[in-house]
Image (cartoon, rainbow, N blue to C red):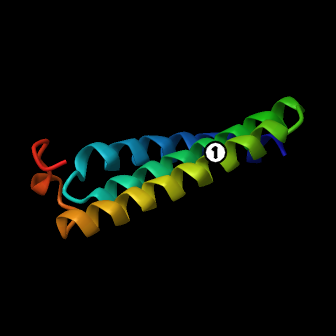
Amino acid sequence: MMILNNLLLCVSFFMILSGIWSFISYRKHLLNSLLSLEFTMLSIFLLMVCFLSLVGQETYFTLFFLTLAACEGALGLALLVSIVRSHGNDYFNAFTSMEC
């Protein structure tokens, strides 16, 4: 069981780093950025679950964190729909501060 938790901790760290890398490198569309942020949040959730189960603590905080991540995702999608309706696309290059 200890080996499995250590493996899941390593996998979650790799997932966090790959999510941050995709957020930094793929900046053409807003949807790509939102998806990479959501992936990073879910990998942090996996890290928290593995760490708290390893330590033996209660996992109520992880449910609160998952709720906040779902609210963040819904807010990001609402922002995406609003931007697509006002600008017609989700390219970062199309956004200017004068139009908003």
For mark 1, does the 10 Å Cα neighbourhood hold few (<14), some (14 to 19), or many (20 or more) residues? Answer: few
- Res. 33 in view: yes
Task: Report whether 67 appears left or right of 10.
Answer: right
Q: Callout 1, which amino acid?
A: Leu
Task: Report whether 55 appears left or right of 11.
Answer: right
Residue 17 coordinates in the image, percent (x, y): 43, 40
* Residue holding disc 1: 68
Question: In this view of the protein, which residue sits in the foreground, 73 or 44?
Answer: 73
Question: In this view of the protein, which residue sits in the foreground, 61 or 11?
Answer: 61
Residue 41 coordinates in the image, percent (x, y): 55, 46
Residue 29 figure quarter: bottom left
Residue depicted at x 39% and y 42%? 20
Residue 49 coordinates in the image, percent (x, y): 75, 43
Query: Of helix, strand and loop, which one carries label 1?
Result: helix
Residue depicted at x 89% and y 32%? 56
Q: How many labels does the image show?
A: 1
Residue 45 figure quarter: top right
Position of residue 63 relative to residue 54, above or below, is below
Position of residue 49 relative to residue 78, above or below, is above
Task: Report whether 39 appears left or right of 9.
Answer: left
Question: In this view of the protein, which residue sits in the foreground, 94 or 50?
Answer: 94
Task: Report whether 77 appears left or right of 71.
Answer: left
- Res. 8 in view: no
Residue 22 coordinates in the image, percent (x, y): 33, 50
Residue depicted at x 41% and y 47%? 18
